[in-house]
């Protein structure tokens, strides 16, 4: 690694904070219909003109705004990923990162104590937090395209029912049901999450309503509903510790029909827990917010085999843009 690469990594918070702030202030939305100069932009934001110009210049330096005859306008990238009306809007994830930024200041404490920086409540305690968290999952999945990739590359032929465990906004389930028109599906999740999921699905997928059931389930405290032909779980294992994951996979085994399929999507790490790089860094976020971390293929295989699953396979999504893999196994 050379100096420039190291310096860019070590100072990456500056770019992140600048983008988060510009988005939160609404700069991209304001420029969505017409270019504005710094004065007009600041006036619409109710902000300081000189400071607004500095932020807008930083966005131009990063390629998220362009300057035309003294006025700022959107670039192809910001129009595609930073406008709320875009199908690839990443803003939900960026606003979530903005909201949790203060917890990163507690990383040193978390490393010293081994304890999370906040109570690991999966953002269920405050409706505003739940909404932001679940919209973030939806936004990241849609902007990057994970749900469409999964629906196109997962062979679910012959399966008539699927549950998306901890399915959050239902983004994966909706894409899977579109690909497999005779399948029925359910999101099994906590009550506060399901309230947000219901709103998102009503807004965006009204034609799927008759095929999607939203089922309250707490996988930590209860056995799972079922039986179902397939169980999909994305970004679930990484929030839990080793013994809870072993117990959860056993519950999944019981919730499946004979011959059923389990599909786990997550950062699936190498034995050293250093690759994929995104997963190694994400484990620090998980340390701050949850009881979990990203796990290796061997660890996940161990839980699956102990529960009775067979034919365990790994399918890695192409990187970039994806950073995760599927672990697929069967109940005999
Ligand atoms: C990181 S999000 C993943 C959402 C979605 N599967 C995805 O990959 O975009 C974790 C999800 O698990 C749900 N969850 C967390 N703890 C749970 C529990 N004990 N029982 C059921 N769902 C839970 C959360 O509400 C949230 O929807």
Image: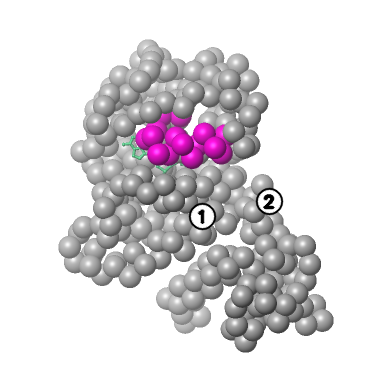
Mark sitting on residue 152: none
Magenta stretch: residue 197 in it? yes
Where residue 208 sits in the image (x, y, percent)?
61, 26
Q: How many marks?
A: 2
Q: Does the beta carbon of the residue at mark 2 sit less than 8 Å from ligand 1?
A: no
Q: Residue at x 38, y 28 (%)?
A: 216
Mark 1 or mark 2, which is nearer the start of the sequence? Answer: 2
Q: Residue at x 65, y 78 (%)?
A: 42
Q: Nearer the viewer, mark 2 or mark 1?
A: 2
Q: Quadrant of ligand 1?
A: top left
**Label 1 sits on residue:** 93
Kindly report the secondary structure that dominates the magenta region of the rendered protein: helix
Foreground of the two, 203 or 302: 203
Magenta stretch: residue 286 in it? no
Name the outermost residue toward the right.
69
Judged from the image, the secondary structure of the residue bearing numbered disc 2 is loop
Foreground of the two, 311 or 321: 321
Crowding at mark 1 (Cα within 10 Å: few <14, some 14-19, many 20+)? many
Where residue 143 sits in the image (x, y, percent)?
60, 50
Residue 291: tell me if it is visible.
yes
Q: Residue at x 65, y 26 (%)?
A: 207
Left/right placement of residue 208 relative to residue 247 reads right
**Vertical side of 62 occupied by 84: above or below:** above
- Residue at mark 2 to residue at mark 1: CA–CA distance: 15 Å
Left/right placement of residue 321 relative to residue 106 reads right
- Stretch in magenta: 187-201
Left/right placement of residue 199 relative to residue 118 reads right
Name the outermost residue toward the top.
258
| Quadrant of the snapshot with the N terminus | bottom left
**Label 2 sits on residue:** 85
């Amino acid at each position: 690694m050379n100096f420039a690469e190291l310096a860019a990594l070590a100072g990456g918070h500056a770019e992140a904070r600048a983008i988060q702030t510009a988005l939160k202030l609404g700069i991209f939305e304001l420029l969505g219909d017409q270019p504005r100069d710094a004065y007009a932009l600041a006036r619409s934001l109710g902000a300081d003109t000189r400071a607004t110009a500095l932020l807008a210049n930083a966005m131009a330096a990063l390629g998220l705004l362009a300057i035309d005859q003294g006025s700022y306008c959107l670039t192809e990238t910001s129009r595609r990923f930073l406008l709320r009306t875009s199908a690839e809007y990443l803003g939900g994830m960026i606003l979530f990162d903005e909201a949790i930024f203060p917890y990163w200041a507690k990383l040193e404490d978390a490393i010293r104590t081994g304890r999370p920086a906040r109570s690991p409540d999966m953002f269920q305690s405050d409706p505003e937090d739940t909404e932001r968290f679940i919209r973030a999952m939806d936004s990241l999945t849609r902007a990057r395209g994970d749900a469409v990739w999964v629906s196109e590359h997962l062979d679910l032929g012959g399966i008539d029912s699927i549950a998306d465990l901890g399915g959050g906004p239902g983004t994966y389930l909706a894409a899977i049901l579109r690909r497999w028109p005779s399948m029925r599906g359910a999101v099994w999740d906590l009550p506060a999450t399901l309230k947000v999921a219901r709103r998102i699905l009503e807004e965006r997928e009204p034609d799927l309503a008759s095929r999607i059931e939203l089922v309250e389930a707490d996988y930590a405290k209860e056995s799972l509903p079922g039986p179902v032909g397939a169980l999909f779980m994305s970004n679930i294992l990484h929030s839990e510790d080793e013994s809870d994951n072993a117990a959860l996979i056993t519950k999944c085994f019981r919730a499946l029909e004979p011959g059923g399929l389990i599909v786990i999507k997550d950062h699936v790490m190498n034995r050293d827990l250093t690759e994929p790089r995104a997963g190694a860094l994400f484990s620090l976020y998980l340390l701050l917010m949850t009881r979990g971390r990203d796990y290796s293929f061997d660890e996940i295989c161990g839980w699956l085999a102990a529960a009775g699953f067979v034919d365990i396979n790994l399918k890695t999504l192409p990187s970039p843009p994806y950073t995760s893999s599927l672990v697929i196994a069967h109940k005999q």
